[in-house]
Image (tube, helix red, strand yellow):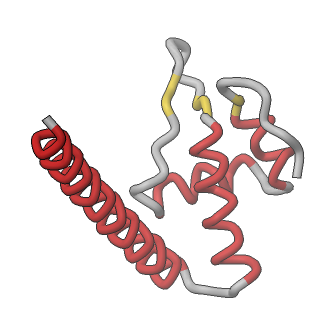
Amino acid sequence: MEELTKRYYGIREVADMLGVNISKLRFYEKEFPTLKPRKNRAGDRIYTKDDISHLRGILELVEEKKLTLEGARQHLKGSTSRQNEIKQMISRLQEIRKFLVATRDQLEA
């Protein structure tokens, strides 16, 4: 896997990097609502590192794990909800930590 050094990549670069056709990238863009590469002023798709990582995940699910497109969508949807749960837990733990630190500081004063 090559290291991503640029901020944005064109569709041809991404297709070559992943070993797929440009048409497959466009197809996945339509099939997976979570994949939304930005477009530049000329209307060309530009992919970020996150977009490329997301595409790699889709390709792994569909081509390596042989999931259907619907199965891959459901898997990604579950991953997203788990990530949101983890973010909420981390946020709550940070709130608890702030409370505990403030309580400790009050007791020491």
Please report the residue visible at 78 percent of the width from the left and 46 percent of the height from the top.
15
Q: In front: 10, or 22?
A: 10
Please report the residue visible at 88 percent of the width from the left and 45 percent of the height from the top.
2
User: Which quarter of the figure is the C terminus placed in?
Assistant: top left
Q: How many marks?
A: 0
Measuring from the top left, give residue 3's x and y in whole percent. Answer: 84, 40
Residue situated furthest top in the rendering: 41
Q: In front: 79, or 24?
A: 79
Measuring from the top left, give residue 36's x and y in whole percent. Answer: 46, 44
Q: In front: 55, or 23?
A: 55
Measuring from the top left, give residue 42's x and y in whole percent. Answer: 55, 14
Q: Quadrant of residue 63?
A: bottom right
Please report the residue visible at 59 percent of the width from the left and 55 percent of the height from the top.
54
Task: Tell me if residue 62 comes above or below residue 80 in the rendering.
Answer: below
Left or right of 39? Residue 107 is left
Task: Tell me if residue 85 comes above or below residue 47 in the rendering.
Answer: below
Measuring from the top left, give residue 102's x and y in whole percent. Answer: 16, 42
Please report the residue visible at 74 percent of the width from the left and 24 percent of the height from the top.
6
Residue situated furthest front in the rendering: 109
Task: Tell me if residue 8 comes above or below residue 21 in the rendering.
Answer: above
Task: Tell me if residue 2 comes above or below residue 81 in the rendering.
Answer: above
Left or right of 14? Residue 57 is left
Left or right of 108? Residue 75 is right
